[in-house]
Amino acid sequence: MDLTDVLKAIINGLVYGSVYAIIAQGYYITFITTKTMNFGQGDFVMLGSLIGLSTFTAITAAGMGVWIAFIASLLLVIIVVGISGWALEQVAIRPLRSWHSIGWILSTVAVAMVVRNVAMLIWGRDVLMAPSPFGRAILDLGILKIRYHEIFVLVGAAVIMLLLYVFLKKSLFGKALEAVAFNKDAASLMGINPRLMASIAFIIAGTLAGVGGVLVGPMVHPGAFIGLFLGLKAFAVAIIGGIENPRGIFIGGLLLGVSENLFALYSTSMKEAAAFFLILVILAVLPQGLFGKRVKEKF
């Protein structure tokens, strides 16, 4: 292991960590608005990657350019997975919110299993090769070589995070979402419809999962089972950064991505354990996450 290996591991970690952070923002938005989340978020990522792959392949086979195919696949994924997020909120969250939380947890897991099985019926059980609009082009920096797609993912994730932050903090819709999260009854008195805000939160969460799937597809080889580890790691990121802090989630994603890739330098089998080892250490010291608010519970 030399300096080049370490630098490569850090770059890879930042790329994958930024994707985890995009997916984890879906947990954040639905949690602050409804105190619920989609435990099948990873399978929505899988759905986005496979729909994006099929659309990209069909359009390029028709003779159109790769960038037209990429933009078209991204738009279709945003529409389909965004609607899927809305549908999940309607059938698996809303009817069970007044029950014990185990109800909506199990119902979202059930939806995830349905989505996974439908994906297996359509695309099969094997992983597929997803092309990037950049092809396999590499930026050669001398001591380090980086795929252009990885640079694109890193920059794209930063732009998405910035747009999401501006939307939540500056736009009227974003402020309405935060108002519902802060006090649903007071928000209702101000003319805000909490049910509409809940639906919008799940549409945004689904959209983020779909976009994450399109970005990560060429790096992980899409398949019906990729949502399992992506969803788990995104959830780990939300816990590490603090599930009510979007900036903390972004930093948590980068931290997890870099940590698991550095662990992989010593042992590839340790890569998957890194996420959960990091959770154990952080929760032992900071139960609210790195950037979450400390809350005292009264008994």
Image: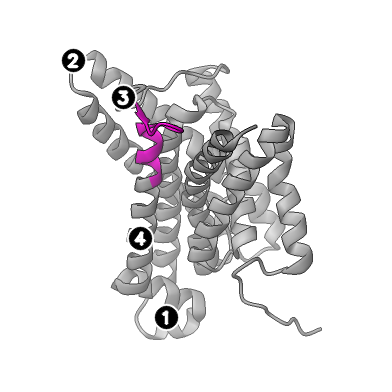
Residue at screen point 33% across, 24% down: 137
State the quadrant of the C terminus. bottom right
Residue beneath the point at 52% across and 36% down: 8
**Magenta segment:** 138-154
Residue extending farthest to the left is 64
Q: Amino acid at mark 3?
A: Phe
N-terminal of the two: label 4 or label 3?
A: 3
Residue 41, given in percent of the width and then of the height, sits at 54, 45
- Label 1 sits on what residue type? Ser
- Mark 4, residue position: 162
User: Is residue 295 depicted above or below 261 in this figure?
Assistant: below
Colour scheme of the rendered structure:
one colour
Pick the front one: 107 or 246:
246
Tell me which label, 1 or 3, sits earlier in the chain.
Answer: 3
| Residue 129 horizontal/vertical position (percent) | 45, 18
User: What whole-number distance in Å separates the C-alpha atoms at marks 4 and 3?
Assistant: 27 Å
Question: Which residue carries the number 1 mark?
Answer: 188
- Which mark is drawn over residue 56? 3
Residue at figure coordinates x 32%, y 59% from the top left: 163
Quadrant in which residue 126 is drawn: top right
Query: Mark 2 near mark 4, Cβ–Cβ under 8 Å?
Result: no
- Label 1 or label 3, whichever lies nearer to me, is 3
